[in-house]
Image (cartoon, rainbow, N blue to C red):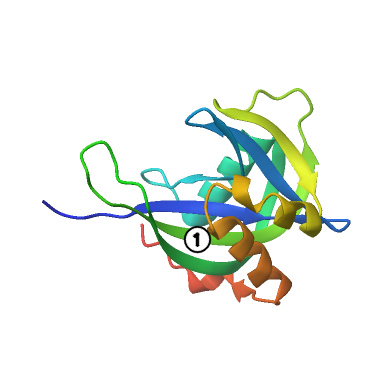
Amino acid sequence: MVWKPNVTVAAVIERDGKFLLVEEEIEGKLRLNQPAGHLEADETLVDAVARETLEESAWHFRPTHLVGIYHWQRPERDIKGGDITFLRFTFTGEALGCEAGRRLDDGIVAARWLTLAEIRANRARHRSPLVLRGIEDWLAGRRYPLDLLVHCA
């Protein structure tokens, strides 16, 4: 059996001192996460994060920088008893506008703009430790050019 991590993307978007997060229902609990999701076949990482941000938050997003690449293994196992590992590419950029009334992805309850204090106060509701880590790396000034990522067609 070949092991393969789940490749995901996420967006750290700050506006007027608040960060865009989504509230989503996961296994019967409301969790907080950045707009995030899985890379799809024949899609670039940059295209994936713009798509996922729109689908989960109704905000159009233009990625400008990579904040970091994170490797995380979920403590819970999958239904077959295997490890669930994520390789997450976190981006930052500009929120270009919201499509009011747009239907959000299944499981997404709402998009929320939260302060850093509110995000930290709700740490127990984060979908993973990558939520706060991406924001903290952004606050620390971590920004890498998008040309670091090479998509060979």
Outermost residue toward the left? 1
Instruction: Tell me residue 18's x, y (percent).
Output: 82, 54
Residue at 47%, 58% (x, y): give it: 88
Q: Is residue 123 above or below residue 67?
A: above
Query: Which image quarter holds the C terminus?
Result: bottom left
25 vs 44, left or right, is: right
Find residue 22 and report its horizontal and vertical position in percent. Answer: 66, 40
How dense is the environment of label 1, judged by Cα within 10 Å: few (below 14), some, or many (20 and up)?
many
Q: Nearer the viewer, residue 26 or 89?
A: 26
Q: Could you tell me which residue is drawn at 73 percent across and 71 percent down?
A: 139
Q: What's under tag 1, amino acid-wise?
A: Phe
**Residue drawn where x is 63% and y is 60% of the image:** 132
Q: Nearer the viewer, residue 26 or 11?
A: 26
Q: x, y (%) of residue 120?
A: 71, 57
For the point 79% across and 41% down, which residue is it?
Answer: 97
State the residue in front, 86 or 150.
86
Q: Is residue 29 above or below residue 146?
A: above
Q: Name the image quarter holding residue 138.
A: bottom right
Whether residue 34 is visible, yes or no, is no
Numbered-mark total: 1
Question: Does 13 sit above or below residue 78?
Answer: below
Which type of secondary structure does the marked residue at label 1 adopt?
Answer: strand
Query: What residue did someone put label 1 on?
Result: 89
Residue 63: percent from left, percent from top: 64, 58
Whether residue 125 is visible, yes or no, is yes
